[in-house]
Each structure stands twice: as C-alpha cells, then as structure tokens.
Amino acid sequence: MRVTTEVPVYKLYGERDQWPTPDLLHCETIAARSKLHNWQIRPHQHHGLFQLLYLQAGSARIRLDERYRKMGAGQLLTVPQMCIHGFEFDRDAEGYVMTLAYPLISKISRGLGEGLPVLAGPQVYSLDDGEDGALARMALDTITREYRRMAPHRESLIESMLSTVLIWLHRNAAQSVQGLPQGVSRGEEHFGHFCRLIEDGYAQQRSVADYARQIGITAAHLNVLCRQAVGQSALDLIHERVLLEAKRSLVYTSMTISVVSYTLGFSDPAYFTRFFKRRTGLSPRNFRFQAKPVLEPEA
C-alpha cells in the first residue's frame, strides 16, 4: 500500500482526538489553523474525511501526494481521504476549509443517485465570475454561515447546500485541474471496500471476520491493511463508526438511551453504556447533557 508510516493521519490537522461534537461537518477559516503553524500545514492525511478548501484571496503552494502546484484566489480544492496533502499559504490568504465525514458524503451521494467520481481523487477547480461560479460561491458561503449558528433546520439547509456544491463539482470536473492521477493498489481497494461495508453494516454488530469474508480476505490481513492505512485495527474503525452514530442519536434525537442502544445493535443497554463510557469517558446520559449547551440555538 502507498505510504503511511512517515505521514501522520489526523482527524483535523494537528489533532488525533475525536471531534468535540457529533456534527458530520467541520468548517473553519484558513487562518484559524494556519496562523498557529506559521501559515504552513505539513504533509498529512485523513481517514474517513473529505475536505474542500476554498481560497478566496491570496495564494498557496499545495502538495497533493508527491506533486506540488500553485493555487490562486477563486479556486476550490477537493481532497479525498488518505490523500497526502500540505499547504504553504501567503499571510494574506483568506478562505475556509470544510471537512466532511464520509457518512455525510455517502448520504448526499445516494440522494443524487450518482457515483460522483469527482470524489475519487484530488482536484482543483476555478470558480468563474459568471452565474455558474456564483452558484458555487453562494452555496459555500451559506454552509459557513449556517455552520456557525443553530438556526431552525440548520442541518437540512447545510446538506442541501453541500448537494449543490457536489453537483457543481460533478458538472465542472472536465474543466478542473487534476492534482494527481491516483493509482490504487489492491490493498487500498480492500481497505476502501471495508470502509464502505462499515457504513452499510455498523449497526448490525458484525465481526471483523464477517467483513473480511465479504471482501475475500482473512481477518488478519484486513487488520494489517487497516494498521498500514490509519494505524488502527479493523475493530477500532467499526467501533469508531458506531460511536459516531451513538453521539448523533444522543444529541439530535429524543430517543431514550435504551432505544439508541437497540438501534445500534446492542442487545443490552448496560453493555452499550459501558462501551460508550470506555471510549468517551462519559456515560451516554452525561454526554447528552454536556453536548446540549454546545448546540443550543442562538439567542
């Protein structure tokens, strides 16, 4: 498999912890993180996250796997999971970075009814000054505005705007500047297949052996591929997805803890509570209580 022992795998750059909220989207300005690192983001990669970087002003030198290129104002970069990427921004660079968890990408892609091959490799797009570019800018601006507040139907509006962006990317793929043609190894194919299977089966409490059998490899080999790719075991990745869904259910629904546990395939709510507390340090009840103030609507 390509790479990973020397290139760190992050949730967000410089962070290895889980996101503090169960949102499937994280949005911040370019300056928010780059200023902390002297405007240089060293080469790294993400597992389970797709990124959109919109450069509104200034310029940047970007690395995509082993290639370097310049990026200018009015351009949009897409970075799929496990693509090695890094940035050197001008100090006057303005714009923002959107980080999407793949469950959200999958949900929107299914709604569009297309495979959206533009998500497969890193690409740079130019937003023109016409109506087409204005549509993409409007959608990106709306996402960043809605992300910062808790207005009614926030999640639905964000998802609709993300759909607009993905459709725009799909329509404009032919005019994009390809960052790097991706040659995918057999091991990478197996790992990607495993990630997709997790998304379909995380609530069924399937074993690592079950997933490996469906892929056509052994459980031991699947664990090796996962550790090579992201430094985690196959079971860690399964549990990570279950935990994400548990957090979202606790914050965004009124389901009781027992119902949440059953919908995630746990036969015993007490076991679900132990599982959740072991990975978060909080009981499901305390997590729900502490997360509510973060997500309260603006006054």
Image (tube, helix red, strand yellow):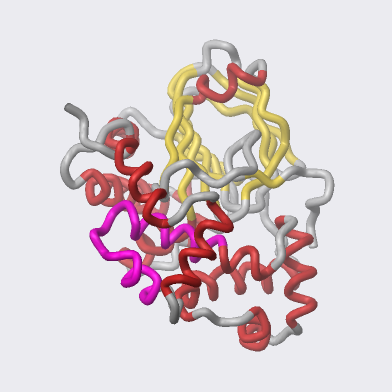
- Counting from the top left corner in percent of width and height, residue 23 is at 39, 47
Residue 65 seen in this snapshot: yes
- Counting from the top left corner in percent of width and height, residue 36 is at 61, 19
The stretch drawn in magenta includes residue 243: yes
Residue at 47%, 69% (x, y): give it.
272
- Counting from the top left corner in percent of width and height, residue 104 is at 40, 57
Residue at 45%, 39% (x, y): give it.
98
* Side of 216 relative to 170 (left or right): right
Please, what is the dominant secondary structure of the magenta stretch?
A: helix
Task: Looking at the picture, tell me which residue is in the foreground, 265 or 179.
Answer: 265
- The quadrant holding residue 233 is bottom right
The stretch drawn in magenta includes residue 203: no
Question: Is residue 82 placed above or below 147 in the rendered structure?
Answer: below
Name, please, the residue furthest toward the right: 6
Residue 132 seen in this snapshot: no
Question: Is residue 121 placed above or below 233 in the rendered structure?
Answer: above
* Side of 297 relative to 43 (left or right): left
Residue at 45%, 71% (x, y): give it.
270
Name, please, the residue furthest toward the front: 270
Give the position of the C terminus as an image quadrant.
top left
Question: Is residue 104 placed above or below 175 in the rendered structure?
Answer: below
Residue at 57%, 51% (x, y): give it.
80
The residue segment tinted magenta is 240-263
- Counting from the top left corner in percent of width and height, residue 190 is at 68, 73
